[in-house]
Image: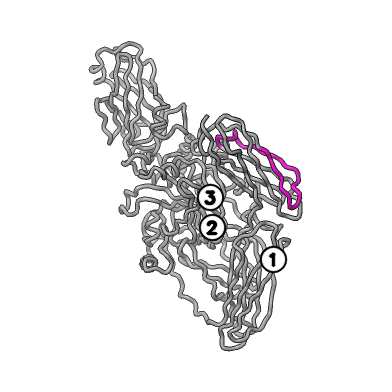
Amino acid sequence: MGQGLSIKKCDFKITKNNSNHHTEEISTKRLMVRRGQPFTVTVSFSAPIHSYLQQLKRTFLIVQTGPHPSKADGTQTEFPISSLGDQTQWSAALEEQDPCFWTISVNAPANAPIGQYALLLHTSKSYCLLGNFTLLFNPWCQDDEVFLANEAQRQEYILNQEGVIYWGTENEVLAQPWDFSQFEEDIVDICFTLLDVGEHHQRHKDHTQRKSPIYICRIVAAMLNCNEFRGILTEYGTGQHYNGTSPSKWLGSIPILQQWVSSQCKPVRYGQCWVFAAVMCSVLRCLGIPTRVVTGFTWAHNTNSSLSVDEYYDEDGTLLTQDKSARVWTFHAWNECWMARADLLPEYSGWQALDATCQKKSKGPSFCGPAPVQAIKEGDTEVDYDVCYFFAAINAKCQVWIQKADDTLKPALGSTKYTGNNISTKSVGSERCEDITQNYKYPEGSLQERVALDKAYRKIKKLETTSSSTEPQLSSIPATLEEPVNLFIHLQSKSSLLLGQDFPLSIDVFNHSGGEKATHLVIGAQALHYNGVPITQLWKEEFNFILKTNEAKNLQVFVPYSRYREELGENRLLRLTAMLRDEDSFYIYFAQEEISICDPPLTIEFPENMVQYQPSTAKISLLNPLTEPLEKCVIVVAGRGLIYRQRKYRLGPVPPKSTQQLQIPFTPTQAGPRRLTAHLTCRQLQNLKSYKTIDIATA
């Protein structure tokens, strides 16, 4: 190749380079490097090179990416091999030379587009392909927009392949395991396929845009939900018949991504918010953007950035689906990604909220973000992208309306519900739940909160007076209803209870008025989907009583298990309501609570000391708390580095009030902290998950 230069082989030093670039878990066979950081290759020659300086002057390296690389569009770059590399652009420096080989240090600039690259050697007369490599974002590089200074956070938000996603209610935050597995074999290729397909749908042909983490986040978010494009997941609608996998049955991202690719990119059925957020987390961590899954409780969804949302009930306290889109969700999961926002003021850099779940918006794509979390907190609703939607979702107030028999609506008193509570994520380096509500909102009632809300309201009025504006408009919260302080009602229950139990309700009513009051009380329990859609009314009791002046009355009632056992729904949420009607004035006073029905214990036990490559056994114990046998029980067990793929075990009937044990033989292949996950389904239970992490000693 050229006079006196013939390539014998090129050693990409994969083990050393991948270790230096924190990509050794992605591959041990392919070069995976991060931008802004040099990597070394050794080129061996077929014949000795004696006048290497002269030859070096005629030799260049070329890197290229994309389907049609060219210098004109920035997807192909040619640069010399010098004695000193330039860190700000593609460059190469000769580190070591011998008549038979050159060791070259290659540096990718910290703003290079991520992607699959080819590396070529160019002399005056010919080109030689040295090999291919993958370039990723680099949170370890100070000049990269995704730079994250804290090493513990980098370990968590880039390298940790196991996570915890929160759900339940604001009073009972529950945890479920998720296997991100962002470094499993072929996942990096699937991630770039996802970018290719997303860019094709959006007719984006400029591969140099891949240098921007904002651009990557928006492409991935658009591809997560097939409502936007021919995306990865189909959103599961309530009442939909299953001809796919229920969202609650997924244990990790890999089966979803692999199924999507193997089916020629047909959307996988089904996903809901936490599945979208979990898969997004896997993809973005794989590409090198620090990402975490966040769950907020009492979330105002599809309000089209309005700061008010309504709930409608009938006179029996049954939640109605009056508005098919805007409603308060019990919980909602989205993502946060860490990056500098060079397009905005410096204070908006840091965590950015990103939501792939479809939103009803006046314009633009159905996903939201990336929106600076700091802008959401400050009420800077005009900031890109979609700050107004996040602000409304966690600051809207919910008014309850009672639909009477003649279809007229009457406001319920004492029933205002506030959104954006207990915003939670997994802690760094542990499986503890961390409350990050303070990142999104100032303390309730504080001066700072008032300032942020006032700022948002001023923006609202400005938009509302600009009739030609096409921006999404935050609608003002209506004035507080004039509430006669005559009656008071308070509903109290346990925040959670074990499946199979009758549960108690305590209702306190108090007559503040100056006279006697004839009242009618309706107490009800309703099964609910997590997104605020009612399933069915399960139980109701009515009471009539006279309250004397300043009299307080307490009622204790029990909801029997037999009333909620059959139609609980996969999220196992109950909406409890108490509606008190003043028979004289016909004012209606309203109270509500939500509770989670918790699964029976599914415990996992390991031997005390476990060593890599040494056979071992885990014990899984299932307690049946019911008065009937658990039937058709299937336990699916998974654990990266512990068990190869998933295993399925079928159990015989588990007798009432008894415990059944299952022995799981396995041989750990990877050292360090490893998690075993068990997922049980049976006729009575559909989503019982448990997990335990054990430290495996190195062999």
Q: Specify the quadrant that holds the N terminus.
A: top left
Q: Name the residue under label 1.
A: 559
Q: Can you give x and y, in whole percent of width and height, for residue 545 in the image? A: 67, 81
Q: Closer to the N terminus: mark 1 or mark 3?
A: 3
In the rendered image, the vertical position of residue 687 relative to residue 117, given as above or below: below
In the rendered image, the vertical position of residue 585 relative to residue 657, given as above or below: below
Q: Distance between the residues labelled 1 and 2?
A: 24 Å
In the rendered image, the vertical position of residue 59 relative to residue 224, given as above or below: above
Q: Quadrant of residue 383?
A: bottom left
Q: Name the residue under label 3.
A: 165
Which residue type does callout 1 highlight? Val
Q: Closer to the N terminus: mark 1 or mark 2?
A: 2
Q: In which quarter of the image is residue 627?
A: bottom right
Do the CB atoms of the residues marked 3 and 2 lie less than 8 Å apart?
no
What's drawn in magenta, residue-wise?
A: 640-663
Q: In this view, does 630 lie to the left or right of 49?
A: right
